[in-house]
Amino acid sequence: MIILSLQSGTSADGIDVAVVEATTSGDRARPDLTLVSRWTRTLDWEPELRARILAYADGECLDAGAHTALTTEIGQGFAAAAATAVAECGLEPDLVVSHGQTVFHWVEDGRARGTLQLGEPAWIAEATGAPVLANLRAADIAAGGQGAPLMGLFDAAFFGPAVDVASLNLGGIANLQILRPDGSALAFDTGPANVLIDASVAEHTGGVLGFDRDGALAAAGTVHDGVLAALLEHPYLRQASPKSTGRETFTLAIVRSALATAGVRLELPDLIATLTRYTATSVADALRGSGPEVRTVVASGGGVLNPTLVRELADALARDGVRLRTSDELGIDPEFKESLLFAFLGFCSWHRIPVSLEHGIARIAGAISPAPNGFTLPAPLDGISRLSLAAAPHPTGEHRDD
Ligand SMILES: Nc1ncnc2c1ncn2[C@@H]1O[C@H](COP(=O)(O)OP(=O)(O)OP(=O)(O)O)[C@@H](O)[C@H]1O
Ligand SMILES: [Mg+2]
């Protein structure tokens, strides 16, 4: 089947679109699943809409009318992105999985109470003619879970039972998945990845720059130990897992308060160097504090494109004897690993396979918006034996040297 995966992460840096072919083999009730990315691209948000998304996620109040307009326009943005993908790759999806745009992840006293992803799926169903699975996190929260991070589901199926591997996704927030010998994954958000770096760059440049391209600012700056120490006092970092967080917890307010505690003002390169070290240190601390013996961390997400962050992280992990690799070394495009996760989750829900996050209660993820012509569900499956990825076949006639 063809699954079209749509998502915009906490950074709202663009709509990640992947058209994924899913094939099964082996056991009928519990097959092996192979995913092939046939088309991937990150499409820009319309700048004015992106500004409204970030303002809302950062705490701006909207009335019901403005909220309605926002979720409608985000849904239309996803629909247009899906239509572009279908037109360009020529593959009609059997299912669209839309993660939506997270604007709030509601956690109180360490318990997730709710989560809000915007983007009305009906627009996507109209644009593609396919059913749309959305609202992927709610069932887990209603069952007592954190609803996040979801990446452990993909990793548990992809890596299988493992004792010494963890995966790390460096999006706005960083999440860590530690594979266990029983085939499950201990997964939790460690804290910030890029969110504070992006917000500080945007604030200091009046929005001219949105992130530290290629880690150049961080590379030019010097870490301020006092500010770093104040940032590392954040209570979320001490909280026991399972835990999840969002950009509402890691805002510029905590940066201002750390600067005030240390009694300094920092030039932008020094601030970004400090925030980059903060991400690296908080990830390494989280891994060290999590028990199981991990020898290799496989990183993905947009943060992998920041060489200063990758170097800081590699150094921090190396002090504990842990080696950092990036997911492309294992055949996973770091920028589209989450797209594959959502395609995988879509395949599971489409076949009524319940999935369980950290608390171990399994639920079928998501809610389906029917295609304009309705939809027919396939026979249910008991589960997936093994997940593997395959490279896309080259288009007919294209010459390949290797
Ligand atoms: N060339 C680059 N140099 C430095 N940083 C980069 C580069 N490309 C991307 N990034 C960083 O990666 C971020 C986007 O990463 P990603 O798309 O994985 O995050 P996200 O959309 O917030 O997802 P998530 O939901 O996982 O938090 C950008 O906001 C930026 O900080
Ligand atoms: Mg993104």
Image: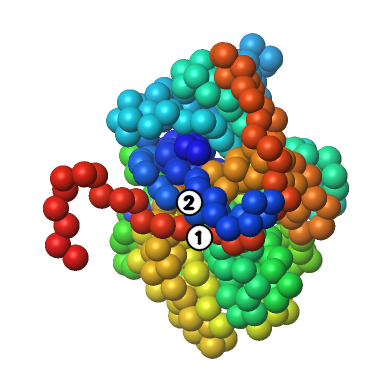
| Among the 4 quarters of the image, the one containing residue 260 | bottom right
Q: Nearer the viewer, residue 237 or 85?
A: 85
How packed is label 1: few (under 14 Cα within 10 Å), some, or many (20 or more)? Answer: few
Question: Of the residues under marks 2 and 1, which one precedes in the sequence?
Answer: 2
Q: Quadrant of the C terminus?
A: bottom left
Q: Residue at x 48, y 27 (%)?
A: 78
Residue 332 horizontal/vertical position (percent): 43, 59
Q: Residue at x 68, y 37 (%)?
A: 379
Q: Could you tell whether 163 is left or right of 85 in the image? A: right
Name the residue that disc number 1 marks.
388
Residue 63, disc? none
Label 1, secondary structure: give it.
strand
With respect to residue 136, does 215 lie above or below? below
Q: Could you tell whether 8 is left or right of 232 in the image? A: left
Do the residues bearing badges 2 and 1 touch, measured as CB atoms within 8 Å?
yes
How packed is label 2: few (under 14 Cα within 10 Å), some, or many (20 or more)? Answer: many
Q: Residue at x 21, y 44 (%)?
A: 396
Q: Nearer the viewer, residue 96 or 120?
A: 96
- Spatial separation of the CA atoms under disc 2 and disc 1: 6 Å
Name the residue that disc number 2 marks.
35
Residue 125 horizontal/vertical position (percent): 54, 20
In the rendered view, how is the structure colored?
rainbow
Residue 51 horizontal/vertical position (percent): 47, 29
With respect to residue 99, does 204 lie above or below? below
Label 2, secondary structure: give it.
strand
Residue 252 visible? The answer is no
